[in-house]
Image (spheres, grey):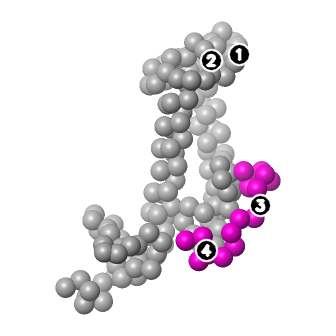
Amino acid sequence: DWANYTDSPLRAFENETGVQPPVGFWDPLGLSTSGNLSDYKRRREVELKHGRVAMFATIGYILPEYWRFPGYLSKFLDIKFAEVPNGLSAFSKVPALGWLQIVGFAGIVELNVYNEQVNDEPGNYGAGFLGLRSIGFMNAGIADPEVRK
């Protein structure tokens, strides 16, 4: 019976945020079987970051159906935002230098803004809602970690 097996390295994560009865700590692929806390926190951080990227990608897919930036995407190539198709076909319309700017900006944000954890919590970079705290638009947030859970 699992309740009696107290020597499992997975027991190290039974008190983490998101562990709920009746399942408890659920790791069907066995990625946490080593019980290494740094591996666990890194995977939790990557999971949260990928979820955030997926949410932004969804918004980026839906938004152009209803609204577009005015003006030019590339004045040099005479491409307007209104001319860029929706969905995956936009990949072929945006110039390579535009993709380089997008990837470069994401890399700069990744390395300079979202690179330290606050209170040793995976995914908590202290930036607040939409990163607004990092540019001074939000209050300090909830200080008590138990209340944040």
> Relative to 106, does residue 140 appear above or below in the rendering?
below
Q: Specify the label residue 48 is tagged with.
A: none
Where does the N terminus fall, quadrant-wise? bottom left
Is residue 36 shown above or below 136? below
Q: Earlier in the sequence, mark 3 or mark 2?
A: 2
- Location of residue 25 by image quarter: bottom left
Disc 4 from disc 3: Cα separation: 16 Å
The residue tagged with tag 4: helix, strand or loop? helix
Asked where in the image residue 144 lies, by quadrant, the reply is bottom right
The first of marks 1 and 3 along the sequence is: 1
Q: Position of residue 95 (x, y in %)?
A: 57, 20
User: Residue 50 at what x, y percent from top left?
Assistant: 48, 50
Q: Are marks 2 and 1 in contact (CB under 8 Å)?
A: yes
Residue 141 in percent (x, y) is at 71, 65
Looking at the image, which residue is at 45% across and 57% down? 47
The boundaries of the magenta stretch are 132-149
**Left or right relative to 8: residue 100:** right
Instruction: Mark 4 or mark 3: name the one nearer the start of the chain.
Output: 3
In-image side of 95 versus 39 (left or right): right
Which of the two marks, 2 or 4, is nearer to us in this view? 4
Q: Do the residues under discs 4 and 1 have CB atoms within 8 angstroms?
A: no
Q: As displayed, is residue 80 above or below residue 51? A: above
Q: What is the number of the mark on residue 147? A: 4
Q: CA distance from mark 2 to mark 1?
A: 6 Å
Residue 139 sits inside the magenta stretch = yes
Mark number, residue 71: 1
Which residue lies under the disc numbered 2? 81
For disc 3, the marked residue is: 139
